[in-house]
Image: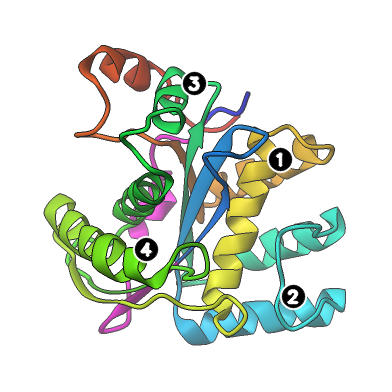
Amino acid sequence: MAVSCRNFPPAMKKIRPVAPCTQVYFDESGGVGDSKGVFAVAATMAMPEQAKRLIKDLRKATGLPHEIKGSGLPLSARRIFFDLLGKLSSGVSVAVVCDRKTSLGAWAMGNDQLPEHLLWTELHIEACCRLPIDGCRLLLSPDGGRYQKAILHDVVRPMLHEQIEARTTAAVESVDFVSSHHVTGVQIADLVVNSVYHMYTESRDAPEIRELIVQACDRGVLLVHDVELQGRRPSWLAGQAKAAQTGRLR
């Protein structure tokens, strides 16, 4: 079973947004009905031009098509991606994971009172709030292809806006649901979260992918954390959820 990072290493604390507005991209992997029992979301903070450059360099080095997806990505291409990710000067990512093998994950993924779109939203909120965003003006770009527009605009958007501002000192300027086909930052988030998904579900390449993730954590460009669901989880799960956070990936 994967062990989650708890805090960014010291190098992470030196990173500060340099743009007037800070762009955050999101994507997810798995789901409540996932056969592997894992639901994960990654948030990637990156300047748009640098995100475009990373994906362009990845396509050039691997020969992959215009829209790069984590699903089916060869291990060799994944190694190149993580190498490029480590060189992204303004880019940091957080992945938050709900794993059915944990008590909290089993409760969350089997709870009729917590429909998937609400859990999806909570994963986005926790991932974003673990980025170094305090004092930033945020432009949020979640992938908009999973749920109906009414759910995204009437439920998800106000929750993201209200909860991120309530839990941090950041100001949410906009929440725009986008297509990964057109937005390279979402493609980066997809590659990050798909890699974390492979690690948690112990796929064939999981040992090698885990090592790539450990190295990214050590470089201060990635944080992996189990979901906490503060304010939603029952009191009897509070102690177990705290015990699940076991420190840096090793």
Cα distance between the residues tagged 3 and 1: 22 Å
Q: What residue sits right under mark 2 in the picture?
A: 58
Look at label 2 and name its amino acid: Leu
Look at label 3 and name its amino acid: Thr
Over which residues does the magenta segment extend?
4-25
Q: What residue sits right under mark 1 in the picture?
A: 211
> Residue 24, how many percent across, how many down?
39, 69
> Residue 188, how many percent across, how many down?
59, 68
Q: Nearer the viewer, mark 4 or mark 2?
A: 2
The correct choice, above or below, for 225 with respect to 240 in the image is below
Residue 87 in view (yes/no):
no
> Residue 100, how many percent across, how many down?
53, 26
Cα distance between the residues tagged 2 and 3: 35 Å
For label 4, the crowd category at 10 Å Cα-Cα, with few meaning under 14, some 14 to 19 and many 20 or more, is some
Look at label 4 and name its amino acid: Ile
Cα distance between the residues tagged 2 and 1: 20 Å
**Of label 3 and label 4, which has the lower sequence position?**
4
- Please give the label number shown on residue 15: 4
Q: In which quarter of the image is the C terminus?
A: top right
- Please give the label number shown on residue 102: 3
Look at label 1 and name its amino acid: Glu
Cα distance between the residues tagged 4 and 2: 24 Å
Judge left or right: residue 194 versus residue 139: right
